[in-house]
Image: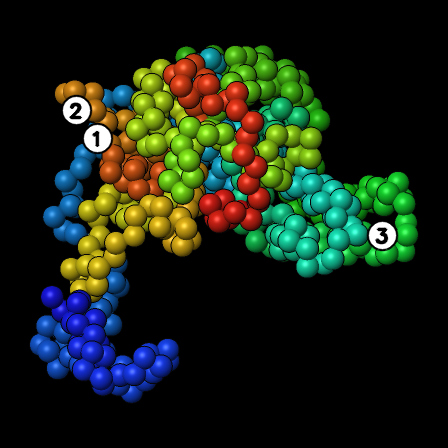
Amino acid sequence: MKKNIVALIFMATFISGGLSAQSTEGVTPEMMSAIEKAYDANDVATKALTNAVSNNDVKKLLLNRTNVGQTDHFFKYRVLPKPNITDQKKSGRCWMFTSMNMLRPSVLTGLNLSEFEFSQNYLYFWDLFEKSNLFFEIMIKNRAEPIDNREVNWAFGSPIGDGGVWIGFANLAQKYGLVPKTAMPETVHSSNTRALNSVLRRKLREHGITIRQMAVSKKSEKEIRNAKIGMLGDVYRLLCLHLGQPPKEFTWRYEDKNKKVSEAKTYTPQSFMKVVLPNLELDNYIMLMNDPTRDYYKLYEIEYDRNVMEGRNWKYINLPNDALKKAALASIKGNEAMYASCDVGKQLNSEEGLASMDNYDYESLFGVRFSMDKKARILSRQSGSSHGMALVAVDVDGNEKTTKWQFENSWGKKHGQDGYLSFTDEWFDEYMFRIVVLKKFLDKKVLDVLTQDPIKLPPWDPMFSMDK
């Protein structure tokens, strides 16, 4: 086949003495001659391909037409009721939207509502505030270390950001509670976070340098921590100006499906969470991961992967895909949506609302083979979790074997299938990375892993860098 001709010609040239061993270290005229001969620009098929690829949207050329319209969006098991679709807009808060979206069916059912949405802006405010404090604490801890120390360098590289995972939501909800969207609506800067992140990172880095300078000047830890209060005051002011001041209490009422209007009541964020989610036990949720680069049935923990200083780090059980699917199927059958994250951009046909390994055919168009498996893609940073969504539906065959799944996304109704993304079971194997499920849906073998001492991983590990 043509895709192997370059290698064959090169080897033939090398064996015949046309290329010396030393010359193969750089790009030589002989090497280029072999490569150009293999390409054969005068070949009719090659000319046609060059014209097509260079003058068109490549994704449209890659689209496998035989796969279009062949998958329905019906599912035997679905978490009900179906809420309105949310929209994170130009922000990286998918993990926060997803965490709240997985809990909304319980609110809709409990209060008999047609629609409901938590305030993402409220928790976003506290997320950035707490991440800023964590950054300051890392600076204080490492104030005597060289500026190129790995931990110092990592912290300065990304003091704060929109990214996160389920445990970040749990840390915030346990400390600050939840409020309805009407209590703290979105602002321009919560919906488009680039400007806020930029100015906040600038100020945090400035304060980080100040902490290091105070250490050089032999200031005591107590003096530095007193200065930190003023630094957090700067952060608070910047956040209030961009996002608004978070409420300590608010008045809320609602209209249910029967058009009955509730009595207006005053809540704190903590009391509101208890009222709308009376059975919520955040400690009962367990994160499961499929990472083939590490041992399965082991407990792992990522250092500093939290937003609240006194909160919990990101901790997960690493499992094979069949164990993740077993837990996910049980959860959906139990009418419990799940936090899930994946490499959403790979093999995704947004117009169809479908992620499938058969959507795009690279090899037929380019004549180049792409053959990395999931493990290789992770190690080479070609793939990793890039987006969180609520896992809400699954379809099965006559033997109850899973065939396809569905996400409730947070990109608005115009993306995918009315805001939902379906994906095949094969795509799950290749590009799903983690889910969060209640303990009651896990078998003993998985639960026993929780008794292990976690294996600590650094926050700059490539498996987790795409979430930031």
Mark 3 crowd level (few <14, some 14–19, many ≥20, 10 Å Cα): some
Residue at mark 3:
215
Three-letter code, disc 2: Asp
Residue 182 point in image, percent of width and height: 57, 30
| Three-letter code, disc 3 | Ala
Give the spatial CA distance, label 2 vs label 1.
7 Å
Q: In which quadrant of the rendered view does residue 389 lie?
A: top left
* Residue drawn 62% across the image and 55% down it: 157
The kind of secondary structure element at disc 1 is strand
- Residue type highlighted by circle 1: Thr
Answer with mark 2 or mark 1, whichever residue precedes in sequence: 2
Residue 414 appears in the rendering = no
- Residue 438 placement (x, y as % from top left): 45, 19
Tell me which residue sits at (65%, 20%) in the image. 270
The residue wearing badge 2 is 397
Residue picked out by circle 1: 403
